[in-house]
Amino acid sequence: MRSYSKPILGISTIRSARFVGLLHNYGSELVRAGYHPVAARLHLQSIVHFGVWLDRKGLHIEKIDDRTVAAFARHRARCRCPRVSQNQARQVVSSVRVFVRHLRERGCVAAVEVLQPVPIVAEFLQWMKAHRGVVDKTLKCYRLYVANLVEFLGADPSTYTASALRNFLATRYRHYGRRSIRHVLAAVRMFLRYLAVDGRCRSGLEQALTSPPIWSRQSLPRGLSAQDVNTVLMACPTTPIGIRDRAVLLLLIRLGLRAGDVAALRFADLCFETATLRVCGKGGREVRLPLPQDVAEALLDYMRGRPQAESDCVFLRAVAPFQPFGERDRGHAVTHIARTALRRAGIQPPTPGAHVFRHTAACQMLRADVGLEGIAAVLRHRSVDTTALYAKVDLQMLEQVAQPWPEVASC
């Protein structure tokens, strides 16, 4: 290709003129998306290898699907294709998957067939969305768990029994921990209540499923010390990635935002004139929080060097294509940033991920004599009882109200 200093190895051996044309168009798309020339060339080399393999297998480009890509991935381990790159890195298959997605978006290959849930599951999901206001992310989890239940017990709810339900949980989710299994139980119970109201199964069947005990007050909230927080922030480099990460970390530390809240932040949510920040969290609850000075300065520093993109999301990927964090679970990207920052600072956190900074923010506010109501407002807890967990952190106050250990009564 003329856009690069070196020819792409093996492109002259591809017999399909249509594939070569699509490859050239894709190379232009990579340039427009901001890919570095070296990175773009590596992507194209992987796709050329895929094109050569398609020729040798006699496969037409219109027939490409995910199974074709999986077959190509297996081929690479024993590849004998002439005049192609023999790079065995995982990025080769990833590049091919992105290329196939690019072709799918432009209608060059068939779209992925989305399997529709069985009617009883689809009706339940529609009812949950219309009458309970459940968001799509929760519905996705409910769909998985309920579909597994229907597959295991059948589509006739009148045959469901307490022993069959317990057998389903013991068989399908025996490897789940106590907290994870509670999510499954919540979905199954709601499904059984829906069926009972609709007259499809016996009422009260959900009571046969007992949740494992989880003692929410059995341990202290585990946050970072002030020295560890400073170490994490100081360890952020002055590169564009480091500036972005520092702004993300300050939002987590100063305001106690959840990872998904930071990833979903948009320019319309920021108001520097009034020094406020709008957050739409769980259940669609929208609040405005004060924007501290250091957080505002970190955001402005990031915006000055932010990559040019059409998206109105504040934070973007650090490498091309410069897009918002993944739509499927944006919080994973922020969690990765938090874990990388902790590892870079050489700090072993009490709990991994971004949530440790939320605990840190609550503990810092408590030590600054902020009341539980104020902490609950910042953390957006629906009940102050949830925030009361942090009262155990103030050990000095607890020492004043603690009763002395009873001595042995004298005879």
Image (cartoon, rainbow, N blue to C red):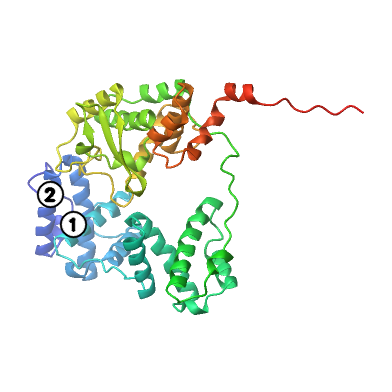
Location of mark 1 (residue): 102
| Element at label 2 | helix
Location of mark 2 (residue): 29
Disc on res. 132: none
Q: Amino acid at mark 1?
A: His
* Front residue of 154 and 95: 154
**Image x and y of residue 22, in percent:** 12, 58
> Could you tell me which quadrant the C terminus lies in?
top right
**In which quarter of the view is residue 381 placed?**
top left
Give above or below for 5 relative to 115: above
Give above or below for 120 relative to 19: below
The crowd level at tag 1 (other Cα within 10 Å; few <14, some 14-19, many 20+) is: some
Q: Answer yes or no: do the residues labelled 1 and 2 have beta carbons within 8 Å?
A: yes
- Sequence order check: which comes first, mark 1 or mark 2? 2
Residue 409 left/right relative to 131: right
Q: Amino acid at mark 2?
A: Glu
**In which quarter of the view is residue 103 placed?**
bottom left
| Residue for point 27% across, 44% down | 325
Residue 267 left/right relative to 177: left
| Residue for point 58% across, 39% down | 217
| Residue for point 33% across, 66% down | 126
Residue 16 left/right relative to 203: left
* Front residue of 168 and 231: 168
Give above or below for 328 relative to 161: above
